[in-house]
Image (spheres, helix red, strand yellow):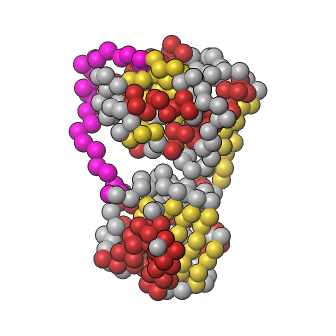
Amino acid sequence: MGADILVVAEHKDGKVKKTACELLTVARTLAAARGGKVLAAVLGPGAGQAAAELGAWGAETVLVGEAGFEAYASLKWTRAICEAAAARRPAAILMSVSSLSRDLAGRVAARAQAALASDCTALSAEGDGFKIVRPMLAGRALVTAVHAGPGPLLATLRPNVFTAEKPAAPAAGTVEALACADDPRDQRVVVKSFAAGGGTRPELTEAAVVVSGGRSLGSADAFKVIYDLADALGAAAGASRAAVDAGYAPHSMQVGQTGKTVSPVLYIACGISGAIQHLAGMRTSKYIVAINTDPNAPIFKLADYGIVGDLFEVVPALTEEVNKAKA
Ligand SMILES: Cc1cc2nc3c(=O)[nH]c(=O)nc-3n(C[C@H](O)[C@H](O)[C@H](O)COP(=O)(O)OP(=O)(O)OC[C@H]3O[C@@H](n4cnc5c(N)ncnc54)[C@H](O)[C@@H]3O)c2cc1C
């Protein structure tokens, strides 16, 4: 195990995702503490274009796998990252918590014989190893663990928890090809299509602002008040499980223990009671605003700002104010 930190950088059509910038910021701190370098691996169509930006975020070497790489292919991507890890022997491999890493991280950890720490909310260098913090039991407890090898640590980091900061001076960003020959056995898992969940809205798990609605919305049509505020704020739209189970919103919008984990700067919960399973998916949001008719709703215990009122009055009023401020 060396001292370098390898970041698996996600991008969309060649544009580096904010989550990759967060990883690179953490990687710089870890690499500096261990006297290693920051490496980035970027794969799929557009990877070459993304590579140029990764140097500005502190990647000293960017391993680019573009030719022969599809938008996502579980087994080939796993092999490519494992081959890179075997050659470079990083102390840690970092990925963001995302749909992609949910599939990829476990595969890479198993093949690379890495210890997998998923959904970390803190990560620092500790002696010759690393200290990680991750929520457990639906967020009711935080576990602190120390990894000291053997083998690398593979950590997935929760989006929006770590602040992305560019280094004072860009790193070299030296591009190297990440070659990985085709293997017919890769065809055992084929990704047939991608379905974007949020339409034109930002991806729920990466959004800086999330507006969510609960059972109290009462119908799919009524969710329009949630979408209007989300669109005014450039936010993603979420829902409680009760709203999803009732058919008011698709499952891709569900926030919580059995849905998505979000960690935006601002989370606006509209008509959501604050059940522990919902809180599990949003409690690390920086600022939580709750709108609820019941002053004793549990969500108010967690909220930074609470509005006791009818969401059908409060939410349109907020939307109007936001739109006025933008005009
Ligand atoms: C194993 C398991 C997993 C689960 N996973 C999840 C999960 O991932 N995500 C999740 O969300 N839940 C999950 N749940 C369900 C969870 O326990 C709650 O039932 C659910 O979160 C409740 O959703 P809600 O807050 O929308 O509805 P309710 O609990 O019915 O709350 C509705 C709230 O709206 C308020 N209200 C009513 N009318 C208005 C109005 N006009 N204006 C403002 N406020 C109003 C009420 O005062 C109330 O507080 C899970 C449960 C189990 C057992």
User: Which quarter of the image is occupied by the N terminus?
Assistant: top right
**In the image, residue 186 lies in the stretch drawn in magenta:** yes
Q: State left or right for residue 266 relative to residue 178.
A: right
Which portion, as a residue range, is magenta? Answer: 177-199
What's the residue at 38%, 16% (across, down)? 179
Q: Give the x, y percent position of residue 19.
A: 52, 43
The magenta stretch spans residue 214: no
Q: Is residue 107 visible?
A: no
Q: Relative to 164, is 45 above or below?
A: above
Q: Position of residue 185 (x, y in %)?
A: 27, 20
Q: Residue at x 65, y 35 (%)?
A: 167
Residue 203 rendering spot, x and y as whole percentages: 42, 53
Q: Is residue 192 left or right of residue 133?
A: left
Residue farthest front in this picture: 327
In front here: 38 or 216? 38
Q: Residue at x 29, y 22 (%)?
A: 68
x and y, in percent, of residue 45 in the image: 32, 31
- Taking the view exactly as shown, the residue that stands out farthest to the right is 127
Q: Of 94 and 26, which appears nearest the observer?
A: 26
Q: Residue at x 49, y 33 (%)?
A: 53
Q: Quadrant of residue 5?
A: top right
Secondary structure mostly seen in magenta is loop
Quarter where residue 177 is shown:
top left
Q: Is residue 236 visible?
A: yes
Total number of numbered discs in the rendering: 0
